[in-house]
Amino acid sequence: MHQVSLLRFALAMAIFGSVGFFSKLTGLPYIELIAVRLLCAALFLFVIWLFKRERRIGSYDWREVGMILLCAVANLLNWLCLFASFEKTSVTIAISLYHLAPLFVLIAGRFLFRERWQSRTVFAIALSFIGTICIMGLKAGGFSLLDGEGIAYGMMAALFYAVTMLLGKGVTKSSLYAVTLLQMIIGLLILLPFVDYSAFFSLSYEQWGYSILTGVVHTGFVYLLFFQSLRHLTARTISLMVFIDPAVAILLDILLSGFRPDRIQSAGIILIFAGMLVSISPRKRKTADALELDKLIS
């Protein structure tokens, strides 16, 4: 295995895992923060392209432009819901629900593409469903209205993330670099009319620093590391390394933000990630989907 690529991907996941914590330090509402992320990421990726020896962002197929546009819209909605969830509930709850996305893809695959479910798939979905119910607050008094909104946004973020992944299956000829840069630009153009520019006037220098950091490092730099490592890693390695993201997010939320999940919520978090582990655990032989994914990233 390519050790440098493994380290790059691990670093990318660790950095992205801290985005929820840093987003709370920016002082920006989620719409304005996402606009900063899109702008910084687009500029960062464009500058990297300018300094490359070969000035080409990668090939893209005009017949896939429509699918890329839909991916950009789905990705934008994914970000909006995720950061709204960060704003309204704890990062731990938001990020745990967000990682239901792969299971939503499994469910969609069953009904849209007639993919066969094995018993382990049903078990994984059942674990995650029970975990979600636990996170929603099976306790006396339930959960606050704000937490309820955060939970709803977290689940919608997972849903739109799943939609982005499903739409991404239709983009096979265009390069990841070109698709991502186009998605950043398209997302920014869609979002600009909804941005409240007065929100930027009251920011301190420190908050500006965190905002730019979230855009350049947590978006642009993370995508760059992602591109440099993706093609050198197997699908199974990527699936396992993705767990670094929520692990970092939850640790930061507990150690620095002071969040303390109750016992039922803790059980729910464990069940969700147990469901994910069951869904990606090795089988006696690779399925057609796994072989296809290995082919796409190789």
Image (tube, rainbow, N blue to C red):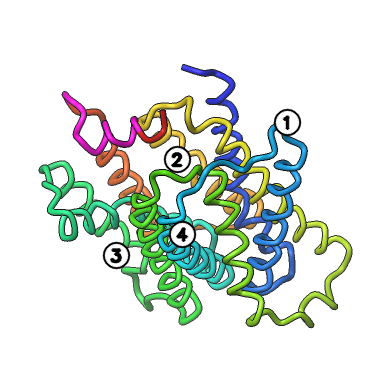
Say if the magenta span includes residue 285. yes
Where does label 1 land, which residue? 53
Badge 3 element: helix
Q: CA distance from mark 2 to mark 3?
A: 21 Å
Principal secondary structure, stretch drawn in magenta: helix
Kindly indicate whether the residue at mark 3 contacts the one at mark 2 (C-beta within 8 angstroms).
no
Report the amino acid beneath label 1. Arg
Badge 2 element: loop
Q: Nearer the viewer, residue 193 or 138?
A: 193
* Magenta part of the chain: 284-295
State which mark lies toward you, 2 or 4.
Answer: 4
Report the amino acid beneath label 3. Ile
Q: Nearer the viewer, residue 250 or 79?
A: 79
Within 10 Å of disc 4 (Cα), the crowding (few <14, some 14-19, many 20+) is: some
The residue at 22%/53% (across/down) is 125
Dot 1 or dot 2: first in sequence order is 1
Report the amino acid beneath label 4. Val
Badge 1 element: loop
Q: Residue 133 got which mark?
A: 3
Looking at the picture, how far across and down is residue 237, in whole percent?
A: 40, 29
The residue at 41%/56% (across/down) is 63
111 vs 15, left or right, is left
Kindly indicate whether the residue at mark 4 contacts the one at mark 2 (C-beta within 8 angstroms).
no
The residue at 34%/31% (across/down) is 295
Where does label 4 land, which residue? 65
Q: CA distance from mark 3 to mark 1?
A: 52 Å
Where does label 2 land, which residue? 243
- Picture quarter containing residue 104? bottom left
164 vs 208, left or right, is left
Looking at the picture, how far across and down is residue 181, in whole percent?
A: 60, 53
Report the amino acid beneath label 2. Phe
